[in-house]
Image (cartoon, helix red, strand yellow):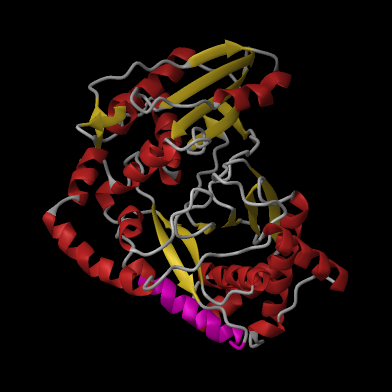
Amino acid sequence: MSSAQKRLYIVQQSEGAELSYNMSEALLLSGPLDRARFEAAFRGLVDRHETLRTGFSLVNGEAVQRVYPEADFAVEYIEAAEEEAEDLARRFVRVFDLERPPLLRVGLVRFEEERHLLLFDMHHIISDGVSINILVDEFIRLYCGETLSPLRIQYKDFAVWQQSEPRRERMKRQEAYWMNVLDGESPRLELPTDFARPAVRSFEGDVLNIVIDKSRSEALQRIADETGSTLYMVLLAVYMVLLHKYSGQEDMIVGTPVAGRTHTDLEPLIGMFVNTLAIRSYPAGEKMFLSYLEEIKDTTLQAYENQEYPFEELLEKVRFTWDLSRNPLFDTMFVLQNTDDRSIDEIGGLTVEPFMQYQTIARFDLTLQLKSENNGTIRGQFEYCTKLFTPHMIQHFAEDFLAIMGQICERPYTLLKNIELTRNAEQEELLAETIDFAF
């Protein structure tokens, strides 16, 4: 297995994690649908990508991937009333048996002669966000009768390359960087919570959507341009300040994902390439925001220069206290999506509408995901563990995130200690009681 696959294989064994790494999508299709062509297109994808014919098991105590020459794949076809769509989409997401490929299931729900719901569900161990775009794009092309160019390599070649001697030499240099960054006992972020932390980590979650308006988005971009940084760096710095304000800590680690496709031959493959970077930061109150942003800029640039070092191997090297109630190394993630999601509104004569599904999984205590929109706004969501936080608390997080951002846009030279939250004195007292309860 690749390093990322090993991590997911282990996490999948955790109690309550069975559905935490399912990646699902749903689309409403209107128009004349050729069911035979529909199924043939997906069969073509299974034939084309070895990952869709791969299972995972233990051989002599070692976790391995096993590629099969073919997989027992069929589209799940049912007929139902359209008012059942939400329930059907929710029940379609089920636990995968990692030993039995394909770890992809596709459903087609017929509401009327020219009205269908397309459902698909993949396990993260064979897929990532870019992979879903590839899957949808190639499905459309095959459904429309195109012939796809052969793939030069398959995912197993990437997994073998990860173990190669030349790469291992390069990884030794990158390992030295990460060991220096994470020297000493790693800090644990202690946010106030509404509920006492469960003894075993919970994956039960919910989301709160947020919008950063156009004027504020433009102000953030101006700060990025004037400081030679990026929008990602500015937003990460704002998020770090939020965490600093809530925790009072001046040393923290936030996780952030990278695509991991560092070679052009990897770009057309369906597979799990994402790596996770541990960004360590020191948001002290006496620092001016622009100075702190410069630190974030330097930290992230160096992290990206060393992004190939597998997070799974890093966990085996650094010092931190293993705790069944928490994620290893960090409990919060920051994500700014920069992949170009293809806007699909037509598939071979079919019109397409996105179908929203309800999110019930939280892989971390708190994750902030953001994405720049074509209209100039930035949309996103706070994904949170419902065993720790109430919607009311997350609403406060969101309001304060926007409030901090507003103050920074107006006065980027301000000291971090002078940045204020939205709460009044009474709310601060309630927050203190929450902290006492949680810890």
Instruction: Tell me the residue at 71%/63% (across/down).
Output: 435
42 to 234, vertically: above or below = above
Q: Nearer the viewer, residue 278 or 112?
A: 278
Q: Which of 140 and 219 is in front in this view?
A: 219
Instruction: Work out whether residue 349 can be spotted.
Output: no
Q: Nearer the viewer, residue 102 or 131?
A: 102
On-image quarter of the C terminus:
bottom right
Instruction: Work out whether residue 184 can be spotted.
Output: yes
Specify whether residue 48 is painted magenta.
no
Q: In this view, does 228 lie to the left or right of 5?
A: right
On-image quarter of the N terminus:
top left
Specify whether residue 295 is painted magenta.
yes
Instruction: Tell me the residue at 48%/81% (across/down).
Output: 295
* Residue extent of the magenta highlight: 286-302
Main SS class of the magenta portion in the image: helix
Q: Nearer the viewer, residue 15 or 307?
A: 15
Instruction: Tell me the residue at 35%/38% (across/down).
Output: 270
Image quadrant in which you'd find residue 223: bottom right
170 to 227, vertically: above or below = above
Residue 363 locus on image (x, y percent): 53, 46
Residue 76 locus on image (x, y percent): 50, 15
- Give the number of callouts: 0
54 to 419, vertically: above or below = above
Residue 437 locus on image (x, y percent): 73, 58
Q: In this view, does 163 lie to the left or right of 184?
A: left
| Outermost residue toward the right in this view | 426
83 to 299, vertically: above or below = above
Q: Is residue 141 left or right of residue 95?
A: left
